[in-house]
Amino acid sequence: MLTYTADRLWEEVVYVAYYLHWSADSVLDLEHPSRLRVIEEIGRINQRISPTEDGPDA
C-alpha cells in the first residue's frame, strides 16, 4: 500500500481548490486517481494559456 504524506495531500487540495474554487471537502471527496487526473488537466490548461519563452507572446 502506498502511503501519502499529509503535506503532499494538502498541496493537491490547495492546487485544485485554488484553480477550480472547490471546497477542501469537495477535493478530498475525490478518489486519488480522479484527483490526480483533475490536477493533470489543470496543468495542461495552464500550459496552453501561459505564454512560453519560445511562443509569440513571450
Image: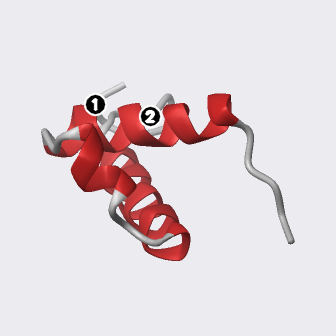
Badge 2, how many Cα within 10 Å: few under 14, some, many 20+? few
Classify the position of the C terminus by image quarter. Answer: top left
Label located before the other in sequence (2 or 1): 2
Residue for badge 2: 52
Residue for badge 1: 57
Say what amino acid the circle numbered 2 marks: Thr
Badge 1, how many Cα within 10 Å: few under 14, some, many 20+? few
Q: Is residue 51 left or right of residue 17?
A: right
Name the residue: 28% across, 39% down. Answer: 24
| Residue 51 image point, x, y percent | 34, 33
Q: Which residue is more in the foreground, 41 or 15?
A: 15
Name above or below for residue 8 compared with residue 32: above
Name the residue: 81% across, 55% down. Answer: 3
- Residue 22 seen by the camera: yes
- Residue 49 seen by the camera: no
| Residue 52 image point, x, y percent | 44, 34
Q: Which residue is more in the foreground, 29 or 19?
A: 29
**Quadrant of the rendered image containing residue 56:** top left
Name the residue: 40% across, 47% down. Answer: 47
**Quadrant of the rendered image containing residue 21:** top left
